[in-house]
Amino acid sequence: MPYASNADLPAPVRDHLPEHAQDIYRAAFNNAWARYADRGPAEHEEIAHRIAWAAVKRRYRKLGADWSPIFS
């Protein structure tokens, strides 16, 4: 179930991440979804979500209730 747009993302992602972080999440999820297509349905989706969150956490950090970009 790749996501065509940020509006299609799950509510916890849409409601809490800034738009750029949503772009990162969506791109990473869609890439992982294609890459791990040979896995079972439940594992397939779990892997894609874990990879997407990991991609976001490389560029953003959570400060309180907000996500802020990491500047290097």
Image (spheres, rainbow, N blue to C red):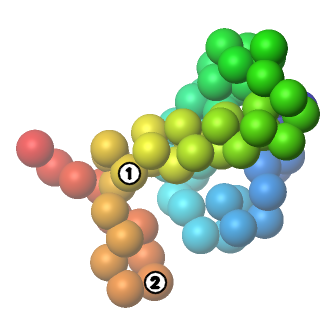
Above/below status of 63 relative to 48: below
Determine if residue 6 is in view: no
User: What crowding class fits label 2: few (fewer than 14 Cα within 10 Å), some (14-19), or many (20 or more)?
Assistant: few
Specify the farthest residue to the bottom.
64
Between residue 5 and residue 31, name the one nearer to us. 31
Q: On residue 43, which mark appears?
A: none
Label tally: 2
Front disc: 1 or 2: 1
Choose between 67 and 37: the one closer to the eye.
37
Q: Earlier in the sequence, mark 1 or mark 2?
A: 1
Depth order, front residue of 46/9: 46
Q: Which mark identifies residue 65?
A: 2
Kind of residue sitting beneath label 2: Ala
Left or right placement of residue 11 versus residue 68 in this view = right
Percent across and percent down for residue 31 are 64, 20
Whole-percent x, y for residue 10 in the image: 79, 57
Q: Is residue 27 left or right of residue 7?
A: left
- The residue sitting at 66% across, 14% down in the picture is 35
SS at circle 1: helix
Secondary structure type for disc 2: loop
- Residue at x 64%, y 24% (from the top left corner): 32
Give the spatial CA distance, label 1 vs label 2.
14 Å
Vertical arrangement, residue 39 with respect to residue 8, above or below: above
| Residue 61 visible here | yes
Image quarter hosting the C terminus: top left
- The label shown at residue 57 is 1
